[in-house]
Amino acid sequence: MFTSILIANRGEIAVRIIRAARELGIRTIAVYSEADRLAPHVLAADEAYLIGPAPSAESYLRGDRIVDVALRAGADAIHPGYGFLAERAPFIRQVRDAGLVFVGPSAEAVEAMGDKTAARRRMIAAGVPVVPGTSDPLADAAEARQAAEEIGYPVLLKAAAGGGGKGMRIVQSSAEIESAFGSAGREAKSAFGDDAVYVEKYLAGPRHLEIQILADRAGTTVHLGERECSIQRRHQKLVEEAPSAVLTADERFAMGATAVAAGRAVQYEGAGTVEFLYQHGAFYFLEMNTRIQVEHPVTELVTGIDLVQWQIRIAAGEALNFAQTDVSFRGHAIECRITSEDPANSFLPSAGRIEWLEIPSGAGVRWDGGIARGYEIGLHYDPMLAKVIVHAPSRELAIDRMRRALTELRVVGVETSAPFHLRVMEEADFRAGKLDILYLDRHGDELTDFEPSDEELRVVALATVLLEEERRARRSITRIDHGDALGSGWSGRGGWTGR
């Protein structure tokens, strides 16, 4: 097992990895930008190193600086979390060329699944069902039009190197092809440095389901069931749950076996997610995420398997100590992503200082957070602050538990998505499991058109009074500044560095 790991990320996922590593007896090393000097992940780690200014291009995306810190700090391995450098093959090679272990798949597996057209070809060869479409990038709009007419409208033009909805256009007729081809290519070039575009059939209102897999170096690969991720906004997931409300046992078996075949097709190692579109009893390969997913906690809660610890164990050379027949599922789990966005104002980002924070707790409630009271929320990074996850014996009880947890959550200082999630938990179609990727298109207005409740107004008023009392108390105390960079409280912390 490793003695030390550097976490090349920030926020709640960095805190999550630190906790998993600490339970394994591993020393943890954090990196941080100037904007994150007092971030929770920095304070939670055994050591922390400054790697640059606030913009991610000058800090968290600087693989050279991260590798240099890992070497200077004596790390054995680097865990990338998700986002930033997690799925960048050049960084994986950089890590391994430096003699360090990358906690994740090989650069070759990342490349194989990163190019969407190449991945489609591999999946077809492996017998994995894919949405009808082209398996090579399109040369021009004329070729796109020909392919679309063969497939049948509506179609999707998609960036070959894409993800997250960037470089994607829905095309309803031949007249829209030329404009859509040009705009999709330009957006893909800007986002991914590659303007290659392909076309596939547009499925109207499918469900978005994904299968979690784990694979060790010996080639043993298992799946850990499905997650439902259909509630999305602009292709970004908002609510996730496990299991899906609609899959039958036979469908789960077939989809799980297909996901395992997809992983084996690229000799996958570690934790990965195979994503599918599901409609009318049929499922189609969408893409593979070659990293841990934001929504991994719901799988952990229904299986009892710690995915982050298994990522680390596999990277350290351990074999899976369980087989597919050992994997069982219990109860139902739901996750809500709490972001610093204002759902009543088109989900615009919200910045400010967290003046008050009350975290939900109690039976069956889990909080994966990267924030704390007094923490400054800026606009430099992804707006996700934390995740509220619940587990209960049934879906109905899990929904009720999430409602209770969301009513306990108090964040004063920035707007958050929590009121939106509370509305979702109360909405009839969600409670009935009537979901697809157009759910928010149908219900957006009723889920986001609201005024603060009386309870919310009381919480803000109480927090304001308590904060003013606290400020008065502070002004009455003579403060002593010892002059060190992170404040006088850090001068005695062993191993801490601010390089």
Image (cartoon, helix red, strand yellow):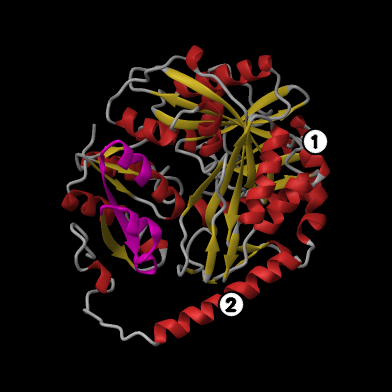
Q: Nearer the viewer, residue 45 or 373?
A: 373
Is residue 144 a member of the stretch shown in magenta? no
Q: Residue at x 58, y 58 (%)?
A: 339
Residue type of the residue flagged with mark 1: Ala
- Callout 2: SS: helix
Task: Quadrant for the N terminus, please.
Answer: top left
Indicate whether 169 appears above or below 461. Answer: above
Residue 464, labelled with which disc? Answer: 2
Q: Residue at x 61, y 16 (%)?
A: 253
Relative to residue 322, is residue 319 drawn left or right?
left
Residue type of the residue flagged with mark 2: Thr
What stretch of residues is rendered in magenta?
A: 18-46
Q: Residues within 10 Å of mark 2 (few under 14, many from 20)?
A: some
Q: CA distance from mark 2 to mark 1?
A: 39 Å
Q: Pinpoint residue 123: horizontal percent, then vertical percent.
A: 55, 23
Q: Residues within 10 Å of mark 1 (few under 14, many from 20)?
A: few
Indicate whether 141 appears above or below 355. Answer: above
Q: How many marks?
A: 2
Relative to residue 433, is residue 418 drawn left or right?
left
Q: Is residue 4 visible?
A: yes
Q: Which residue is mark 1?
A: 432
Q: Pinpoint residue 165: horizontal percent, then vertical percent.
A: 62, 48
